[in-house]
Image: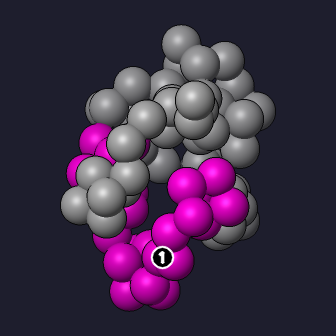
Amino acid sequence: MMNTPEQVLARVFGVSDGDITDATTPETLAQWDSLAHMMMIVELEREYGVAVDPADALELRSVAAVKEYLQANGVAW
């Protein structure tokens, strides 16, 4: 069973799972800076076996957007 996106992002950002919701964005989570964003992309690729195009990576600015992207690329958790 795969980790949920919330679990993956909590691990990347160093917060508890409960701190991550669909509404979480860089504006609502201080730990989500540019370096953490790149770490998030790498971890999503590793965890779910997807290759995130750099142009798409720039659009993944909320947990909801991350989940929609993963689902559009055939990832289920």
Which residue is found at the position 66% from the left and 18% from the top?
A: 16
Quadrant occupied by the C terminus: top left
Q: Tell me where the magenta segment starts and ends, as one range.
A: 44-69
Q: Residue 31's spot in the image, x, y percent?
A: 66, 42
For residue 75, side relative to residue 52 (left or right): left
Is 21 located above or below residue 54 in the figure? above
Is 49 located above or below residue 23 in the figure? below
Q: Residue 23's spot in the image, x, y percent?
A: 31, 32
For residue 6, side relative to residue 42 (left or right): left
**46 or 24, which lies in front?**
46
Q: Which residue is mark 1?
A: 52
**74 or 32, which lies in front?**
74
Q: Looking at the image, what colour scheme do you see?
A: one colour
Q: Quadrant of residue 72?
A: bottom left
For residue 71, side relative to residue 8 (left or right): left
Which residue type does callout 1 highlight? Val
For residue 49, side relative to residue 77 (left or right): right
